[in-house]
Image (cartoon, grey):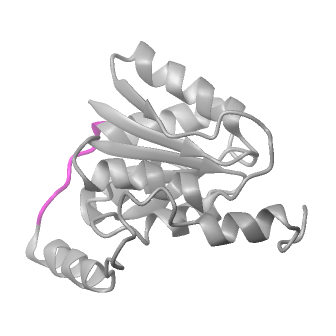
Amino acid sequence: MIISIGSDHIVPDIKMKISEYLKSKGHTVIDNGTYDFVRTHYPIFGKKAAEKVASGEADLGVILCGTGVGISNSANKVKGIRAALVRDVTTARYAKEYLNANVIAVGGRITGIGLIENIIDAFLEAQYQPTKENEEIIKGIDSLIKNDEGQFGNEHFFDEFIEKWDNGGYPKE
């Protein structure tokens, strides 16, 4: 299976451990960054990882930030993505079986590496269980997303935000 991963500057070390774990299980990993602890704009990496899944380059995605909240929101803005914020094995399995989630987000600062590995295993092993009810729910979720012109695959999509970031326009942690 091909897995697209990404993280913010808070947990690149956890992302690298997850990458190695996935490779040890025989998966191919597309690492979308970030690669160090230099403060960055996390939506970039949620978007990049999600676009690989939406385009079909990857089968599924795993994204991480400190809590998983921010990066899951950015991934969910990509048309064709159903990202689920998960903190336990049951939620990961449910997200895939009932909502056909194709990306999971995990908080690397609040979830231990062993549990993250178990969450990923459950997500990858689970199979979507299509029912009329599940299909209607997914149809409703998917209808909420629109693809802004010039968004998909645009490496410069966040340029204005990065400039603001670099100029101190966002508060530091």
Residue drawn at x 65%, y 57% is 42
Q: Quadrant of the C terminus?
A: bottom right
Where is residue 37 shown, x and y percent of the image? 79, 38
Who is closer to the viewer here, 80 or 111? 80
Residue 67 spot, x, y in % from top left: 69, 57
The stretch drawn in magenta includes residue 128: yes
Q: Which residue ends up furthest to the left in the rendered image?
A: 132
The residue sitting at 55% across, 29% down in the picture is 18
Q: Quadrant of residue 77?
A: bottom left
Left or right for 86, reference 125: right
- Residue 86 in view here: no
Q: Position of residue 141 (x, y in %)?
A: 30, 80
Image position of 42 with respect to 73: above or below: above
Question: Could you tell me which residue is drawn at 38 percent across and 17 percent down?
Answer: 25
Please report the residue visible at 50 percent of the width from the left and 40 percent of the height from the top: 32
Answer left or right for 164 relative to 119.
right
Residue 40 drawn above or below residue 133: above
- Locate residue 1: give its quadrant: top left
Q: What's drawn in magenta, residue-wise?
A: 125-130
Q: Is residue 72 left or right of residue 142?
A: right
> Left or right of 156: which side holds 137?
left
Look at the image and tell me whether residue 37 can be seen: yes
Q: Nearer the viewer, residue 121 or 33?
A: 33
Is 90 covered by the magenta stretch?
Answer: no
* In the depicted structure, whether residue 27 falls above or below residue 142: above
Q: Nearer the viewer, residue 157 or 93?
A: 157
In this rendering, the count of numbered labels is 0
Q: Main secondary structure of the magenta part?
A: loop
